[in-house]
Amino acid sequence: MDYLEIEGGKRLQGSIKISGAKNAALPVIAATLLCKGKTRLKNLPDVVDIRTLLKLLEMLGAKVGRGEDLVEIDNSDIVSTRAVYEIVSKMRASILVLGPLLGRFGVCEVSLPGGCAIGQRPIDLHLKALEAMGAHIEIKGGYIRAEAPEGLHGSRIIFDKITVGGTENVLMAASMAHGTTEIINAAREPEIIQLCEMLMSAGIEMEGVGSSRIKIHGSGGRALEFTKDISIIPDRIEAGTYLCAGAITYSQITLERVNIEHIQTTIDKLGVMGCDFEIKDDSITIFPADSLTEVNIVTAEYPGFPTDMQAQFMAVATLAQGESLIEERLFENRFMHVSELNRLGADIWLKGNVAAVKPVEKLYGADVMATDLRASSALVLAALAAEGTTRIRRIYHLDRGYDDLEGKLRRLNARVVRKKE
Ligand code: EPZ
């Protein structure tokens, strides 16, 4: 098993390019199943989750061609609509093939996604919505079997909880349904908007894109054609993670190819902590605080403070002058990084879904273990600031969502090496 060895306490410097967003690329790749020809995608991040989903599509019969910054997916010859446990258990976002397979083929079997470190993560809202659109859903032997022999029909879907994946599945299914679907309480993440733009580029008419009420006028069963190349939007969580790296090491660094609007809450919160920024078009330079001020955070759906930035901010907050309070409202178990950060010398206390991050002078290198994607990035940030050497194990979590993390950190002058046990 690989582990990362990081020599902390060094200033970072320089600039890096931010990759395409994993959480935008996943639904876009799933949506190519709605097309019975070729779709060309650009700026896909090279991370394990993307490779896993492309492998799933190949198992269904897709042909995937890889070029320089271009991936072409040919779905003209899909021979199976069964997403097997071996793949889905590795990457729960595989559930995003449910909507497009059902919309295009009228029948599919998708393994129930396994559990996850950060929470139970049910998909009840996805299934309820598809049933409202005419799907017959049965769960047997760990698989969802969904059928809509006459195709799906439009419906009024009210999500009692905002769900990114649920909104994405319904958007894809509705784009091939007969009639109009309205989603009430839809997710508004930038990744949702990219998916809507992709579907509209194939002629699907929509109203309310970017709002919490979206209307989709389905194609009535006609497969879609994506004639224009689709370029994946910059990864707002990767960008936020590197801004936190600048903040926690008191370094001035520059990120290129970011979408500033998508990282506004991260900029605002780092501003509260004393950092400054220079923004030019699609690049941002962080000027570190002389000393970090404490911060209070409550995670919320977009445009609120992203839950996927919670762990990273907790790492930065460990070195603030005062006590920070961080409340996690989306997931029931997204504090797995707390005990590992405390091993590095942090002083964090949990009470329910609130973490109190008490100030400490310094962090000290130690052996720690990654537990989930964003928790592991928080450990990397803490290790960059800690005095001495930190070894982070189970970094396969990192590889799922950060494209060339070591390469980017080394370009920022960090001392990080990947080693084998
Ligand atoms: C997406 O997960 C992201 N993943 C997550 O990022 C992100 O943390 C999450 O949205 C919230 O922003 C991808 O986009 C691939 P949800 P998703 O459905 O779609 C509950 C990362 O680090 N819920 O919006 O699975 C659920 O349990 C990952 O890149 C139901 O109860 O999230 C959770 O508490 C981690 N029933 C809340 O809603 C359902 O049917 C939000 O889940 C669906 C969800």
Image (cartoon, helix red, strand yellow):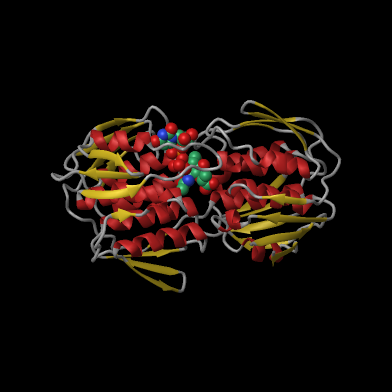
Q: Which residue is located at x 81 percent, y 51 percent?
A: 365
Which quarter of the figure is the N terminus placed in? bottom right
Give the side of residue 247 with respect to residue 238, left or right.
right
The residue lying toward the viewer, choosing from 280 and 374, is: 374
Q: Residue furthest right?
A: 361
Asked where in the image residue 3 lies, by quadrant, the reply is bottom right
Res. 147 visible in picture: yes
Q: Position of residue 227 (x, y in %)?
A: 28, 63
Q: Which residue is located at x 70 percent, y 49 percent?
A: 379
Q: Position of residue 90 (x, y in %)?
A: 47, 53
Q: Which residue is located at x 46 percent, y 69 percent?
A: 69
Res. 270 visible in picture: no
Give the side of residue 70 with respect to residue 39, left or right.
right
Count of marks placed on residues: 0
Q: Is residue 160 above or below residue 37?
A: above
Q: Residue furthest bottom?
A: 67
Q: Position of residue 13 (x, y in %)?
A: 75, 60
Q: Is residue 127 above or below residue 111?
A: above
The residue lying toward the viewer, choosing from 113 and 337, is: 113
Which quarter of the figure is the C terminus placed in? bottom right
Q: Is residue 421 above or below residue 93?
A: below
Q: Residue furthest front?
A: 141
Q: Which residue is located at x 36 percent, y 34 percent?
A: 125
Q: Is residue 270 above or below residue 101?
A: above
Give the side of residue 288 with respect to residue 352, left or right.
right
Q: Residue furthest left?
A: 150
Q: Position of residue 137 (x, y in %)?
A: 25, 39
The residue lying toward the viewer, choosing from 229 and 35, is: 35
